[in-house]
Amino acid sequence: MLHPTNTRIVFAGSEEEARSKYLELGVKPKHQIADLECYKAIDEEDFDINAEMNFIGEISVSPSIMADIRTDPEHAYVLYYMEDSSSPERE
């Protein structure tokens, strides 16, 4: 079963930079099968900068995360691992 884990907000000038900054944090997935998802918040189709909560990719972001995004929405990226919990755990 796929599920999102290790969600972080990263401020960057590009998706490539956001992915690099996320990986520099040392965040590791728990399972062997995991894909790093990256979304620029304001580019999401139904994103509303003034809403308390929003859906970004496969997750909903809370009011506290929205407050962080509002500090610099042009550079806010939401990243998380989409992990397959049926795959073996990493050692």
Image: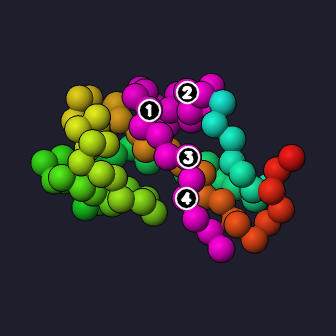
Measured from the top left, where is residue 74 in percent x and y? 28, 33
Going by the numbered disc 3, the residue's amino acid type is Asn
The residue wearing badge 3 is 6
**Quarter residue 72 falls in:** top left
Sooner in the amino-acid sequence: mark 1 or mark 4: 4
Region in magenta: 1-25
CA–CA distance in space, label 4 to label 2: 19 Å
Measured from the top left, where is residue 1 in percent x and y? 65, 74
Q: Residue at x 40, y 28 (%)?
A: 11
Asked whether residue 73 appears in the rendered view, the answer is no
Measured from the top left, where is residue 78 in percent x and y? 43, 44
Which color scheme does this rendered protein use? rainbow
Asked whether residue 8 appears in the rendered view, the answer is yes
Q: Which mark is residue 86?
A: none
Going by the numbered disc 4, the residue's amino acid type is Pro
Going by the numbered disc 1, the residue's amino acid type is Val
Q: Which mark is residue 4?
A: 4
Q: Are marks 2 and 1 in contact (CB under 8 Å)?
A: yes
- Which SS class for mark 2? helix
Q: Residue at x 75, y 71 (%)?
A: 86
The residue wearing badge 1 is 10
CA–CA distance in space, label 3 to label 1: 12 Å
CA–CA distance in space, label 3 to label 4: 7 Å
Label 4 packing within 10 angstroms: few (<14), some (14-19), many (20+)? many
Q: Is residue 27 left or right of residue 76?
A: right
Residue, far right: 91
CA–CA distance in space, label 1 to label 4: 16 Å
The stretch drawn in magenta includes residue 13? yes
Sooner in the amino-acid sequence: mark 2 or mark 1: 1
Q: Are marks 1 and 4 in contact (CB under 8 Å)?
A: no
The vertical placement of 70 against 91, above or below, is: above
Q: Which mark is residue 21?
A: 2
